[in-house]
Image (cartoon, helix red, strand yellow):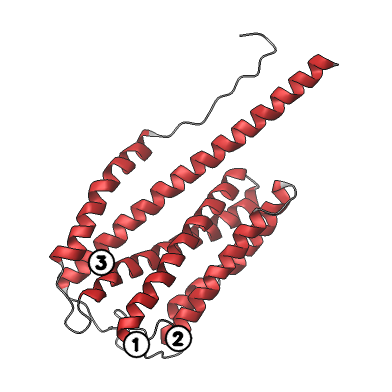
Amino acid sequence: MGSDEVKIVLPKQSKFHQFLVIALFPLMGIALYLIFVWSPVERMMGIVQKIFYFHVASAWNAFLAFAVVFVCSLLFLIKRKRIYDIVAGISAEIGVVFTLIVLTTGPIWGRSAWNTWWTWEPRLTTTLILFFIYLAYILIRHMDGAWDKKARLAAVFGIIGFIDVPIVFMAIRWWNSKLHPIVFGSGPSGQGGGIEAPMLFTLLFTVGVLTLLYIVLLQKGVYIERTRLVVEKYKIDVIEKLMNKGT
């Protein structure tokens, strides 16, 4: 290798990430078995109720993803380290996907429960607003301009946008919506409508598996973004070397 040649060192995926990817596939298979075979069919709604597991697990992971955006945005504004901006951006993209799943599975469930695909009840409306908030966040990150200025603006937007997350969660309690079921924590006693033990186990297992999926996607997204930045820097260094040779 010549002394004027530019060396490129790409990031590497950790063995922990590889382990999580290997573990994810059988766990997803087990989750599907629990949902469609092992857990009982709900008496009133029938087989359609099983979409509940995907709906709730996706909602949890959307909230988790946006919480990560909130924390990393704060850390970026305090420490100005680019890794926090990268994690926030990737987490927001994953959160938007999970929110889209929530907004897709919700009407399918609602069509059977409420006899309508959509109604402007509090939780649906605030969830739709949440979806558009983080779509706008992603658009801010893809604007033209210096990355640090976009990162600061996106960080502020990500912090303010997180306000809607607890609003979505509490919407059916604050506005006493009769359409959305409350399974846990309803009323003065803090008890919801309840759920059978096999259904509860299946729900918690599905939430855990989709949380693992979120972690894997976040790690992969951060790896891809870091690789992209390294390649961009390499291209700039090569261009500078070529320009110096030509002068």
Residue at image position (45%, 87%) is 174
Residue lying at 25% horizontally and 66% vertically, measured from the top left: 203
Badge nearest the viewer, 2 or 3: 2
Q: Disc 1 vs disc 2: Cβ atoms closer than 8 Å?
A: yes
Q: Circle 2 sits in a helix, a strand or a loop, which is it?
A: loop
Viewer-closest of 228 and 160: 228
Determine crowd level at label 3: few under 14, some 14-19, many 20+ residues with C-alpha closer than 10 A: many
Mark with earlier residue (2, 3): 2
Judged left or right of residue 243, residue 31 is left
Q: How many other residues sit within 10 Å of disc 2, few (<14), some (14-19) or many (≥20)?
A: few
Measured Cα–Cα span from mark 1 to mark 3: 22 Å
State how far apart marks 2 and 3 are (Cα). Answer: 25 Å
Q: Secondary structure at mark 1?
A: helix
Residue 119 image label: 2
Instruction: Point out residue 19 in the picture as x, y percentages from the top left corner.
Output: 31, 38
Residue of label 1: 114
Q: Earlier in the sequence, mark 1 or mark 3?
A: 1
Residue 69 on image: x %, y %: 54, 58
Q: Position of residue 154 (x, y in %)?
A: 65, 58
* Residue drawn 51% across the image and 43% down it: 222
Mark 1, Cα crowd under 10 Å, few <14 / some 14-19 / many 20+, is few
Q: Which residue is mark 3?
A: 203
- The amino acid type of the residue labelled 1 equals Trp
Which quarter of the picture shows residue 162? bottom right
